[in-house]
Amino acid sequence: MISVRTRLIAFAPLVSLTLLTAAAAVGGYRTSGEPPAVAPAAASRTAPTATPAPDFGPSAPLPNLYPLLPDRAPANLGTARRAWDGAFDDLVDASSGTYSWTVYAGPRQQTFQSETGSFNLDPFQSRFDRTIPAGGGTSQVLHVRRLDGTAYVQFEDWGPWTGCWLRVTPEQYERLTGEDAGEFIPLPDSVLVISEAEMTGSTGLWFGPPFREYNATVSAAAALVFFGFNGKVIRDEVDRLLTIQVPITISLNSGGQLHGGGAHGGQVAAAISKSAPGLIEEALDLLRDARASFSLTGTGAPVSVPAPLPQSLLPFDADKDDTCAAKAPRA
């Protein structure tokens, strides 16, 4: 039987490109063309708050305060790789999870994008709420529900569309972008990216609820998704980006469960530039001062992902004069 991690690895690079491209393409009444890159650019100008990055986290320097951890989070690479696969087996047994994801950017490492959400593995479905910069020092909140191969998207402040939901099926995505949506796994991008990680060694230990952090690699395409770049930045060079491996970190807690992961934008940018000089230079300039962090905050609790009511749905080709029959914020 194919494991869930194997299935996620197979589809993560493709699935991660789809949703935000489609959502942003229709946001602000767009029905064609491409939005600006949703990327960690100039946080000092656009971050809605000045929340500093924590001193320690999944991608921060780790002091060696716990010389010994239980064998469920081993230092030996071969054993650790088996433990990493086992952590996904534990996640499958739990069947659901909650998580948080944050991108920090700028000289002060302020919060640039953040997301909290939950997901089910049987059946595959998820819901999340993401805060993104909207320009001019403001922010926008994106609500997403993914189930049955379909995504439902809503911006919190959407003009006459406020309170309405946009349904994006794989067929509609293909019509909008000209890209093959493939087999859709409706899980959060950060979960899909972490599932792709290939462990390469141990980095050190953290204090607090103890966990061990490991070096790992993912494709450059997956890493850019992890930092919140929109689909166009990746899609135009996806074949090349999928061949480039870049560094991230992943972690297991003392019980051997998946703890989280992180990435430093400067390290990712350097790896891309070394493998493909001149590739996506503008995006890499934005990436170098960024840091991204993912944390699995709970497992096993029931997760409900209801589809929005039919009367709250916009037509897929909606323009600024359209609305929905009934407003249904945050279904």
Image (cartoon, rainbow, N blue to C red):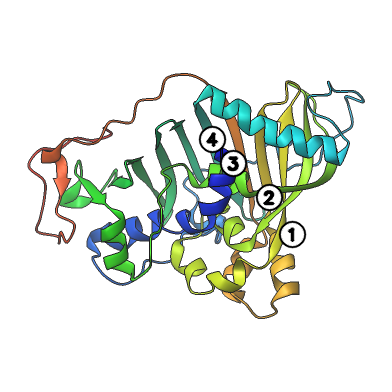
Q: Dot 2 corresponds to which residue?
A: 263
Query: Dots 3 and 2: beta carbons under 8 Å?
Result: no
Name the residue that disc number 4 marks: 100
Say what secondary structure mark 4 lies in.
strand
| Marks 3 and 4, how far apart at CA | 20 Å
The mark that comes first in sequence, 2 or 4, is 4
- On the picture, is 96 further left or further right than 173? right
Above or below residue 150? Residue 268 is below
> Quick one: quadrant of the N terminus?
top right
Q: Residues within 10 Å of mark 1 (few under 14, many from 20)?
A: some
Please report the residue visible at 73 percent of the width from the left and 45 percent of the height from the top. Answer: 249
Q: Nearer the viewer, residue 249 or 47?
A: 249
Secondary structure under badge 3?
A: helix
Q: Earlier in the sequence, mark 3 or mark 4?
A: 3
Pointers 1 and 4 in contact (C-beta within 8 Å): no
Q: What's the amino acid at mark 3?
A: Arg
Contact between marks 1 and 2 (CB within 8 A): the answer is yes
- Mark 1 highlights which residue? 267
Q: Looking at the rendered structure, which numbered label has been put on residue 5?
A: 3
Q: Amino acid at mark 1?
A: Gln
Q: Could you tell me the amino acid type at mark 4?
A: Ser
Q: CA distance from mark 1 to mark 2?
A: 8 Å
Q: Is residue 152 left or right of residue 275?
A: left
Indicate the quadrant containing the C terminus: top left, top right, bottom left or bottom right. Answer: top left
| Alpha carbon separation for disc pair 2 and 4 | 15 Å
